[in-house]
Amino acid sequence: MAKKFISLARTHKLELYTSALGVMTILVAAAVVSDQRSLQSPLVVAALAAVAAAAERGSVRLSSNMEQSISLLPTLFAAVVFGPVEGMLVGAASNLGDLRAPYMKWAVYTSTRSIGGAAAGSSALWASGLAENALGALVLATASGGLAIVACDVGFSMLTYKVKNKGRATDVLRAVMPIAALVIPLWMPLLALLAFSYEQVSPWTLLLFSLPALAAHRSFILYQEQRRLTTDLQVVNDRLEAANLSFATALVATLDARDRYTAGHSAAVAVYSRDIAKRLGLNDEQQRRSYVTGLVHDIGKIGLPAGLLEKPGALTLEERRQMQEHSAIGERILAKIDTYPEVAQIVRHHHERMDGTGYPDGLERDAIPLLSRIIAVADAYNAMTSDRPYRDAMPSRVARLRLAQAVESQFDTTIVAAFEAILAGADESYRTGRQEEFHIMDAPQLVVPVRDAA
């Protein structure tokens, strides 16, 4: 019932608005006709009206609620060359090319285009008297008339948008102004030159009207295509990013289900890595990649022998060698995913060391990918500040001291310094990985049997 009442109120509001515009149009028509009783060049005006109507049929969509066309151009030409009556007639006739339901919309825009044409003609007539020669008069008339018709068109569009409750009126400005900034500098001079040629050379030069009209229309189409392609690409990228993150989360949930001791470790590394990347001034794409890579950096542990991750005591040399295979295994898993090739390389090298003694490839310093160096610092810190079956969690200050002691041998000095600056300004829940953002995944609480050491 409430929705029906709101709909009826909105319809009533639109009917009142349409009626008010109709009355205003009649009053404006009476005013301009009283000043200019005879219609000049009826055949030319009819031709301009036909061009305006055809242009309106070729309007381009700026958004789901807004369209724009080049029908203002023949309207402005008629207003500048002949006067407000002719401008009003061509403006009204432009909507004959768009005569279709809903007819209330047609009535609204017929009224606003008529008023705009009359305003352009009156403004052009006033401005033409400010110059001493014919060319100057037409330039001023075109500029003044153009500003008047654009102001009317945008102003009425904003008002109509508001009356229809389509959103904020400023949305109209954001949609229209980029196009206006593109085409106004193009067609203002061309229309002034065309009007001068029509009056001083021959009326047949009116055929040249098609050139600026086609140029402006092409500009509209190109702008609209660019907007559509940009929007479509953004939608695809957003969906792809969401799919990547969902996939990464699923992989890590699988790992956390196997290793209950390190459940949540990957989420913490992801958050720390993202924040370090941001602190270093890396761009948004690299920050997102740092986060995703942090999530999946240990995914290769899925491929380790059963019992190795769950072993409560110290590892043997052979077991340690097997454990070190997890970064290469992770690369092989992630490399099979089309959207993860760079992530796979970062994961492979997140256990390399600055002095070249890391694994699996013994890379050193700048040969190690930057994001791998970031993951290494975040990984080591969270491991030290988390409980393990063979030791309790270290206090944050101790873990930070360990990081500082290992700069240039194991860790990148710049990255450790950036992380220290983050931790120094953070609260204890962040330092220990207890904030809500560190628990984005509801990993299954699965207890994995621990193999008997005997």
Image (spheres, helix red, strand yellow):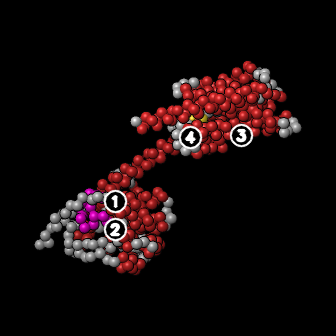
Q: List x then y, in percent, for residue 381.
A: 36, 72
Q: Amino acid at mark 2?
A: Arg
Q: CA distance from mark 4 to mark 1?
A: 41 Å
User: Which mark, residue 32?
Assistant: none
| Residue 118 visible in image | yes
Q: Which image quarter: residue 50?
A: top right
First in residue order: circle 2 vs circle 3 = 3
Q: Amino acid at mark 3?
A: Leu
First in residue order: circle 1 vs circle 3 = 3
Name above or below for residue 241 compared with residue 140: below
Query: Magenta residues, as a range?
Result: 252-265
Q: CA distance from mark 2 to mark 3?
A: 60 Å
User: Which mark, residue 434?
Assistant: 2
Question: Does the magenta-highlighted stretch encompass residue 317?
Answer: no
From the image, tell me which residue sits under label 4: 162
Tell which tag, 2 or 4, sits nearer the viewer: 4
User: Which of the pair 310/44 is nearer the observer?
Assistant: 44
User: Which of the pair 289/394 is nearer the observer?
Assistant: 394
How many numbered tags mark residues here? 4
